[in-house]
Each structure stands twice: as structure tokens, then as C-alpha cells.
Amino acid sequence: MKARDIMTVGCMVVSADNSVRHAARIMLDSGVSGLPVLDDTGRIIGIITEGDLLRRMELGGPRPRIPTPERRAIDYLKRQGWKVADVMSRDVVIADENESVDSIAALMAEHGVKRVPVLRDGKLVGMVTRRDLLKAICAAPQEPIASGDAAIARTIRTRLDQDLGLGKDRVNVSVRRGVVHLGGTVGSEAEREAVRALVEDVSNVNGIEFDLSVAAR
């Protein structure tokens, strides 16, 4: 699944010369928490979010405890500058419309952002937000597998090996009438829970019987 498949199109934007109040009003009226900032050619040059507005003078935002002259100047702009350009974040995390969804999720986690503008040939075409990722999770179908106990067992063994590095020497898998029996020893409670989650995600599983112990440290 690509960014273009889940992105929100027709997102609201502002220019660097718009007022902060104008941007805040758009956020309120549109129910969004961030707006891309575009230049006169339609290129993205920044983003203004609710987080950028937390230090506003109107809110009595915090000042740096021991400011340097440069830090004091930046803080003044953030607190009292009236233009979007004074407040916006200029280091924007962006993605191409063909970027994979898992790659975008990784970008959000790595940079601690809630939204990623999506570009086509350098121009803004949409926005992927955390909510869009949640929608993608809900819409994703389970991977189909052949029915039958043998097929279920093969699928589980393959995924245990590929996803968790747990081979037959660590976890024994048997299936009867759709009920999966798991035996063996894993290295931690986290591994045990990961095995449970993996099996629950397999189609046609009717139940799980755990005989999976955690090795003593």
C-alpha cells in the first residue's frame, strides 16, 4: 500500500505571509492540527502545527530558562511574531506519493511527527496523518491461507521462523480442528506474547493451547 492510497487529498494550506490567527482559525474550522505552508509556486516550505503555537504570548507560553541571544530572538518570534513564517517548522518530513505506508509510519516514529505531506513532482498532493494510518490498519485484510490443519501449521511455522527467528527447535506447532497447540521454550515473556499475537493473526485459527514456557535467566 502506498501513500497515494491512504492520503487525505484537498488538505488546507496557508502561506508564509498569512497571520498566525488566520492559520489557527483554519485549524479550528477544518478540524485539523497542522497545515502545510506553501510558497507562491506551490512548493512546500514549512508546516505549522498546534505544537508550534504552544509558546504563543496569548497562551502565556514558557520561556527558555537560560536563553542565549539567538535563542531569545527565536523565542520572541515564536511567541510574538504575527506571521506564519515566524512560527512554522521549516524542517518538514515529506514523502513521495509512491512511498510505502510502512515507510511513512517509520518516518513518523523516527521524527516524532503526526503528519507527513505527500508530494508528486515536488508539489503537494495530499497529507498522511496518524488517523490515515489507523484507517489503513482497519482496512487491511488478513492474508488468506489454504484451509486445513496442515496449512495452518505450515503458515505458523514459516512466520515464527521469518518474523521472530523461532525455528522448530524452539517452538513446536501442532494443529487439530483449527486449534493450535504451542510447545517449547522462548527467551522472554515478550517473545511468548509475540508468538501469541502471531498465531492470533493467522486465518482459520479457532483457538490456542499454550504450553510455551519462558527460559529462566
Image (cartoon, rainbow, N blue to C red):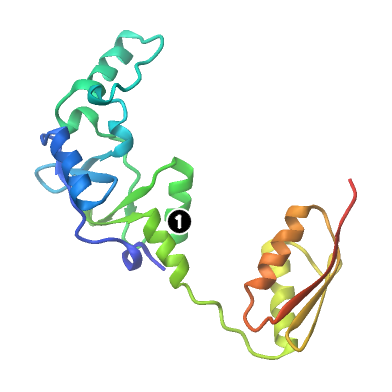
Q: Secondary structure at mark 1?
A: helix
In this image, 71 relative to 125: left or right? right
The quarter of the picture where the C terminus appears is top right
- Name above or below for residue 185 compared with residue 180: above
Image location (x, y in percent) of residue 72: 30, 13
115 or 165, nearer to the observer: 115
How many numbered discs sit on the rendered protein?
A: 1
Q: Quadrant of residue 40?
A: top left
Quadrant of the rendering where the N terminus is positioned? bottom left
Residue at 48% x, 43% y: name it.
Answer: 110
Residue that numbered label 1 is attached to: 103
**Which residue is depicted at the point 75% across and 57% down?**
191
Q: Could you tell me residue 136's position as x and y percent?
A: 42, 66
Q: Where residue 190 appears, x then y in whole percent?
A: 73, 54
Q: Residue at x 71, y 66 (%)?
A: 196
Which amino acid, mark 1? Ser
Q: Residues within 10 Å of mark 1 (few under 14, many from 20)?
A: few
Seen from this angle, which residue lies furthest right?
Answer: 216
